[in-house]
Image: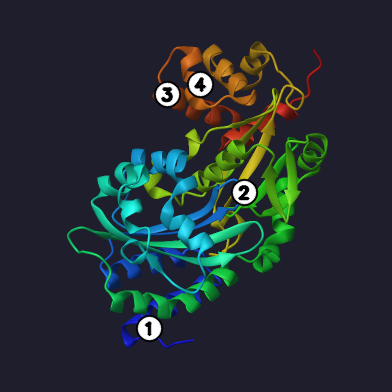
Amino acid sequence: MSTPSFHSSSLINLLLETSYCNSRWKYFAEELVRQFSLHICHIFIVNRRTMGIRFHVDGGVRMDPALAKHYLQEHIDDDPMLLAAMNKPRGLFYSVGTLPEREEILQSKQFREWFAPQGLVDSSSACILSDEDWFGVIFCNRHQDIGEFTVQELNHLNSLLPFIEKAANLSFSNAYLSKDEIRLASVVNTFRIPVAILTETGAVCAMNQGMKDLIEDYNELRIEHNCLRLEDNRLEKMLYIGLMQTAKRVEGFDMMVEEAEHIKIGSRIFLGFQPLLNSYITNEETFSGAMIYAISADLIQQIPAQKLVELFDLSEREASISQRLASGKALKTIADEECISLHTVKWHLKSIFAKTGCSSQIALVNLLNSIPYNP
């Protein structure tokens, strides 16, 4: 392993910290941007089968949200720099300027629609993690005002790569996930509806019996290598994007937690997301993830609106919104069906929370499912 030059000592120190605190990857990306005059730096973990991203941090200039979504939908499957990191020998950063297929990349649709609009002139990528199901990649992008990477700069990046790889393997292993196992189990077992707690990287930390039964009964869901997986590739992408949304890590993707799309599985099951804050689990900054919950006509009892009005002094509109939310509908869908604005739905939701004593959507769904009721 070659020794990086002295100016890289701060980068190595940050990498040492990432092994016990994933949020330090953000600081590392920002420092990489500063020292190498990058426009933006991306670090993420990608599923080999679905190309779904399960972890992402960036540093530098924030990407336009519409452009970021366009990349995820249209270009991630054939990104030449991502493919270079995946398929070429490990241990090196590969830049557009040094690849034999340079001219082909510059003429590609992916370059014209995603790379060029950002004013980028060069990109260097490297694999930082690889196993049977997942691989990690780091992108270092340069703006045309700065110019392409020099040989010396690529050598500096290559000297850092062994340290980055070691940090990635330590950070994204599952060894630290059992630290709060008892407390996480106690959290999920307070819910009557199917609930599981996942890390931002998709690993399952805890699930209640309802979620275990659901996974066993539905072929569309399964646990593989301690990660929740979906048979449908498109839905699995949505799952990992939803986890990132909910963990509030993808700042540039214009994603609001309360509007993370519910995932419809089959004809009757919806998976919803609920943010899980570090302070809710532990005083240490070691956990970042989300709670997912399942909703369906089979799992959620349908309480008449009038019953909700009587029990919680809800208005008819608030009762209707509560019913729709409990049936798996997203806030935007509820707004359309109620013929009101999304802002008005959120305003009603705050009132519903105040009257029911709930602090979140999942708590409200759980409450509605816990009400003794005989039709």
Q: Which mark lies nearer to you, 1 or 3?
A: 1
Would you place residue 215 above or below residue 81 in this image?
above
Mark toward the start of the polypeptide (1 vs 2)? 1
* CA gap, disc 1 and disc 2: 36 Å
* CA gap, disc 3 and disc 2: 36 Å
Residue 333 bears which disc, if any?
Answer: 4
- Outermost residue on the left side: it is 145
Mark toward the start of the polypeptide (4 vs 1)? 1
Would you place residue 319 above or below residue 88 in this image?
above
Where is residue 104 drawn, in percent x and y? 35, 52
Residue nearest the viewer, comparing 96 with 236: 96
Residue beneath disc 2: 49
Q: Quadrant of residue 180?
A: bottom right
Q: Quadrant of residue 217?
A: top right
Identify the element where label 3 is drawn.
Answer: helix
Mark toward the start of the polypeptide (2 vs 4)? 2
Q: Which mark lies nearer to you, 2 or 4?
A: 2
Residue beneath disc 3: 342
Q: Residue at x 40, y 19 (%)?
A: 341
Tell me if label 1 and label 3 are in contact, CB under 8 Å.
no
* CA gap, disc 3 and disc 4: 9 Å
Around disc 3, counting alpha carbons within 10 Å, would you say few (fewer than 14), some (14 to 19), or many (20 or more)?
some
Mark toward the start of the polypeptide (3 vs 2)? 2
* CA gap, disc 2 and disc 4: 31 Å
Around disc 1, counting alpha carbons within 10 Å, would you say few (fewer than 14), some (14 to 19), or many (20 or more)?
few
* CA gap, disc 4 and disc 1: 50 Å
Work out which quarter of the rendered image holds the C terminus and state it: top right
Residue nearest the viewer, comparing 61 with 76: 76
Tell me if label 1 and label 2 are in contact, CB under 8 Å.
no
Would you say residue 255 is visible in this rendering? no
Identify the element where label 4 is drawn.
Answer: helix
Residue beneath disc 1: 9
